Image (cartoon, helix red, strand yellow):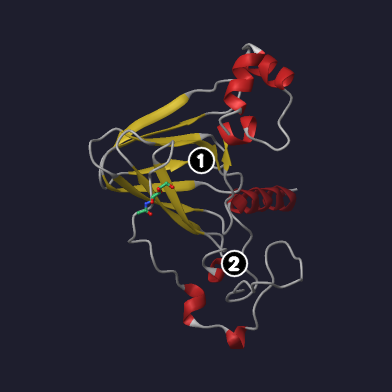
Amino acid sequence: MAKSVLLICLLGLAFAFAAADDSPLQDFCVAQAGSSVFVNGLACKDPKTVQANDFSFGGLHLPGNTSNPVGSKVTPVTVNQLPGFSTLGISMARIDIAPWGINPPHTHPRATEILLVLEGILEVGFVTSNPDNRLISKILQKGDVFVFPQGLIHYQRNTGFGNAVAIAALGSQSPGVITIANVVFGSMPHISVDILAKAFQVDKTVVSQIQSKF
Ligand SMILES: *[C@@H]1O[C@H](CO)[C@@H](O)[C@H](O)[C@H]1NC(C)=O
């Protein structure tokens, strides 16, 4: 009896720690670009051919170009940019936001995100899942850290007069991004206007107008 309780506790712990990608089964598994082998993730390079550059990425000192309709630019460093991230369960990004620009509401299906503000002032927020849908938001200053729990819809807005710069760390080598507006109104082919009009409780012309922007 005591043994089975212990086993259940251990299983519970195992699941609690499985909030990020699975643990590696070797020192590293540097992703091999162009491999035709499909595994859950990416194929590994021969460890003997691995170089320091496989574990490195340069360029995050460069500001992203924020001249776009939302006024922000995310520069990702995932396993696609840094093959050494493969199987390690982490990645990062630089986020540049122009004054009053936004990083629009989005979610990472596979990762919790920690955000560190390096420059400027950011309003950040996330919304809890159904049925509460509570907005949890805060104004962040330089040096502040905020966490967006895995899967929840979140955003950032620069509420200052200068450019804002933040660094995000994510608990997956490939966190994925679902940008709500683009996914809902910009899918190809489009989700039927009838469906979106009913879902958003607006006239079909409003849906068509939004769809035309994406
Ligand atoms: C930034 O992006 C805009 C719009 O795409 C482009 O016109 C402009 O040349 C870019 N600026 C730089 C410095 O690359």
Question: In the rendered view, would you say 147 is above or below 78?
Answer: above
* Nearer-the-camera pick, 63 or 32: 63
Residue at coordinates 55% horizontally, 21% vertically from top-left? 132
Question: In the rendered view, would you say 140 is above or below 169?
Answer: above
Query: Which numbered mark, 2 or 1, is in the foreground of this view?
Result: 2
Residue at coordinates 67% horizontally, 36% vertically from top-left? 187
* Nearer-the-camera pick, 174 or 28: 174
Rendered location of residue 163, percent (x, y): 28, 44
Q: Residues within 10 Å of mark 2 (few under 14, many from 20)?
A: many
Rendered location of residue 73, percent (x, y): 42, 47
Q: Which mark is residue 86?
A: 2
Query: Viewed as shown, does residue 71 lie left or right of 185?
Result: left
Mark 1, residue position: 149
C-beta proximity under 8 Å, tags 2 and 1: no
How many numbered marks appear? 2
Quadrant of image for the C terminus: top right
Query: Viewed as shown, does residue 156 lie left or right of 19?
Result: left
Q: Residues within 10 Å of mark 1 (few under 14, many from 20)?
A: some
The residue type indicated by label 2 comes to Ser
Q: Which secondary structure lies at badge 2?
A: loop
The residue type indicated by label 1 comes to Pro
Query: Viewed as shown, does residue 142 lie left or right of 112?
Result: left
Q: Going by the picture, which residue comes out furthest to the bottom?
A: 48
Rendered location of residue 57, percent (x, y): 44, 69
Residue at coordinates 62% horizontally, 17% vertically from top-left? 200
Q: Which secondary structure lies at badge 1?
A: loop
Residue at coordinates 51% horizontally, 83% vertically from top-left? 51
Q: Which mark is residue 200?
A: none
For marks 2 and 1 on the same chain, the one whose residue lies earlier in the sequence: 2
Q: Quadrant of residue 50?
A: bottom right
Question: In the rendered view, would you say 189 is above or below 54?
Answer: above
Q: Distance of mark 2 from mark 1, alpha carbons?
A: 22 Å
